């Protein structure tokens, strides 16, 4: 892999300084470094291409500098182009990243030597239907969430699976998560952990008012439809905790497996269970 694109959260402390070192190191290894406009402007360099689609079509991989939020954002944008990502943790938890700063250049050496595997992750697709119109469509790597606003009132969420009525949740909201998202919001709401290369979806109610309401694991080939029955207060749809849309009474959100898959470059000496032990240590998030 010699054509290496760089995607970075340039607002994070220390990112620009690290970028200079990474670019210098890669060029010394005779790599062709491709910068998008935001990164190039921040570094006062000429951008390689005027827009991200042009850059990504020439890159063999993307180095992503930031935290989990940066990875999620990059995954949604890059998934249609079928390009693998390699995450460098500049955030706090860094569950989706592959290397930490102390091991950065050792990890990059392994990458250039081919000591990696490509791991594919299923993604979710969400459609918002208002009346007879499909008003919004988006994809997610972690989760699609419907949740109430600031007022302390539960909302009523009629939930269908494969066009069959499942239940109506009286709850603060509902999460539909991918296996990758099982370690995120769904976990906090009591959902199960899932190995990320599985093909499934997890339906997790948020603070449901009912002892019977428990998380449900379904096939990735299924379709979940959530109908908003409540007519009071603000209700929001959020995707990966980053994109939001205000919902109205009568709106339906349809969640299914996306036609795209996120691809991650994984070093040969790292595995999901080791990362799980490291990142979710009891009471310690500064890892």
Image (spheres, rainbow, N blue to C red):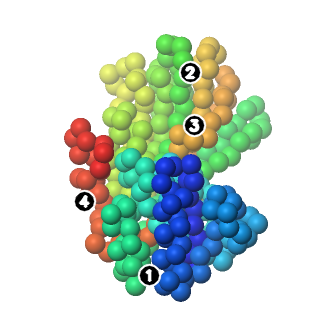
Q: Badge 3, how many Cα within 10 Å: few under 14, some, many 20+?
A: some
Q: Is residue 183 left or right of residue 30?
A: left
Judged by depth in the image, the label closer to the viewer, 3 or 4, is 4
Judged by depth in the image, the label closer to the viewer, 3 or 1, is 1
x 32%, y 22%: residue: 211
Residues at marks 2 and 4, CA–CA distance in whole angstroms? 37 Å
Element at badge 3?
A: strand
Camera-nearest residue between 260 and 99? 99
Q: Badge 2, how many Cα within 10 Å: few under 14, some, many 20+?
A: some
Q: How far from the left and from the top, in percent, is residue 183?
A: 37, 46
Could you tell me if residue 159 is visible in this image?
yes
Residues at marks 4 and 1, CA–CA distance in whole angstroms? 23 Å
Residues at marks 3 and 1, CA–CA distance in whole angstroms? 37 Å
Residues at marks 2 and 3, CA–CA distance in whole angstroms? 12 Å
Q: Which residue is mark 2?
A: 149
Q: Which residue is mark 4?
A: 274
Q: Which residue is mark 3?
A: 238
x 34%, y 56%: residue: 195
Please tell me the numbered disc located at residue 112: 1
Element at badge 2?
A: loop
x 39%, y 79%: residue: 109
x 50%, y 83%: residue: 28
Sooner in the amino-acid sequence: mark 4 or mark 1: 1
């Amino acid at each position: 892999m010699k054509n290496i694109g760089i995607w970075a959260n340039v607002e994070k402390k220390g990112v620009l300084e690290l970028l200079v070192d990474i670019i210098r190191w890669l060029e010394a290894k005779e790599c062709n470094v491709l910068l998008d406009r935001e990164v190039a402007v921040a570094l006062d360099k000429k951008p390689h291409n005027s827009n991200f689609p042009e850059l990504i079509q020439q890159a063999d991989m993307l180095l992503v500098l930031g935290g989990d939020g940066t990875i999620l954002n990059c995954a949604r944008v890059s998934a249609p182009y079928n390009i693998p990502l390699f995450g460098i943790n500049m955030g706090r938890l860094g569950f989706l990243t592959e290397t930490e700063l102390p091991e950065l250049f050792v990890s990059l050496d392994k990458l250039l030597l081919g000591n990696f595997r490509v791991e594919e992750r299923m993604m979710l697709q969400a459609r918002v239907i208002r009346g007879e119109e499909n008003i919004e469509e988006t994809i997610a790597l972690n989760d699609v969430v419907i949740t109430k606003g600031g007022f302390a009132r539960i909302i009523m969420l009629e939930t269908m699976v494969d066009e069959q009525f499942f239940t109506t949740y009286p709850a603060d909201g509902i999460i539909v998560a991918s296996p990758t998202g099982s370690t995120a919001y769904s976990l906090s709401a009591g959902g199960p952990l899932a190995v990320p290369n599985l093909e499934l979806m997890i339906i997790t109610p948020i603070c449901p008012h009912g002892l019977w309401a428990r998380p449900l694991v379904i096939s990735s080939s299924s379709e979940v439809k959530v109908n908003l029955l409540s007519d009071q207060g603000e209700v929001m749809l959020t995707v990966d905790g980053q994109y939001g849309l205000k919902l109205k009474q009568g709106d339906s959100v349809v969640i299914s497996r996306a036609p795209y898959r996120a691809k991650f470059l994984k070093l040969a000496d790292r595995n999901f269970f080791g990362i799980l032990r490291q990142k979710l240590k009891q009471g310690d998030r500064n890892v």
